[in-house]
Image: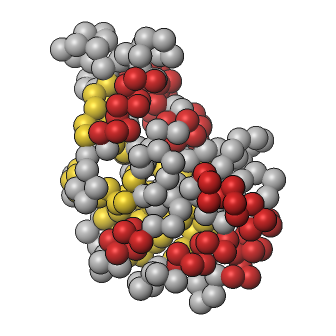
Amino acid sequence: MKLRILGCSGGIGGRHLRTTSMLIDSDILIDAGTGVGDLSLTELSLIDHVFVTHSHLDHVATIPFMVDTVGGMREKPVIVHAIPDTLEIIRNHVFNWEIWPDFSQIPTPEKPWLQYQAIRIGETVSIDGRGITALPANHVVPAVGFHVDSGRASLVFTGDTTTNDPLWAAVNRISNLKFLIIETAFCNREKQLAVVSKHLCPSMLAEELAKLERTADIYITHLKPGEIELIMQEIEECAGRFKPRMLQNNQVFEF
């Protein structure tokens, strides 16, 4: 299994800042932030599944454009997988004919370009031998993280989250854990903002990583543009035995 980072920033700007999205092999997206827009038409047309952590715009922005762009090039609909609350938000506030056409009904209700598939925390969706399991997240809207398992090794992406004991209980049960991608959106001086918005800052990250009982390569995502260097410096100072690295756009994980 190969996972490529299409976007991992907390914002946009310039050539390298793209919001959250990850491409598994050629056919599965984890989130669909602005990084998806860098894919070619052919690459977009091969995507069959989008697993969404939550409904915020930086994680779903390109789903409408992608479906509109390549729907007519495909033989089957794109399937959006998310928890029921997230699907309801996407239906009501994106594909609602006011923000964007409802592609779950067009070109025809019988053969739409978009379908929804509800998932639940702890449920594993198996696609050609690849398992994707929804993990608990703690954010300001209903949210999940994802455990991606190739059968040989696993990667965990926390999604947007703050202090989250149920996540670590689930992660500590993953015997083949290899990679952990976790957010840290704000620097320590903005801890109160991190708490209110249910994100992490470096001091909070350190407290969360102390709950990890497995060994893993740890990567930091969702850093706020303009504070990237400061956040990573603070993480280095407080992460203890862990040595987190900053996630990079176009980075590839094989497992």
Residue lying at the far bottom in this picture: please name it.
241
Q: Is residue 28 visible?
A: yes
Task: Measuring from the top left, give residue 160's x and y in whole percent.
Answer: 52, 54
Whether residue 223 is visible here, answered yes or no, is: no
**Horizontal and vertical percent position of residue 59:** 52, 41
Q: Residue at x 25, y 60 (%)?
A: 122
Task: Classify residue 184 as left or right of residue 73.
Answer: right
Q: Is residue 54 above or below residue 178?
A: above
Q: Residue furthest left?
A: 110
Whether residue 12 is situated above or below residue 147 in the rendered picture: above
Q: Nearer the viewer, residue 115 or 37?
A: 115
Q: Residue at 35% x, 18% y: name it.
A: 103
Q: Quadrant of the C terminus?
A: bottom left
Depth order, front residue of 135/113:
135
Q: Quadrant of residue 183?
A: bottom right
**Which residue does the image show at 45% across and 81% down from the upper left?**
212
Locate the N terminus by quadrant. Answer: bottom left
Q: Position of residue 236 (x, y in %)?
A: 71, 79
**Residue 150 shown left or right of residue 213 in the figure:** left
Q: How many labels sit on residues? A: 0
Residue lying at 41% horizontally and 16% vertically, measured from the top left: 96
Quarter of the image for residue 75 reads top left
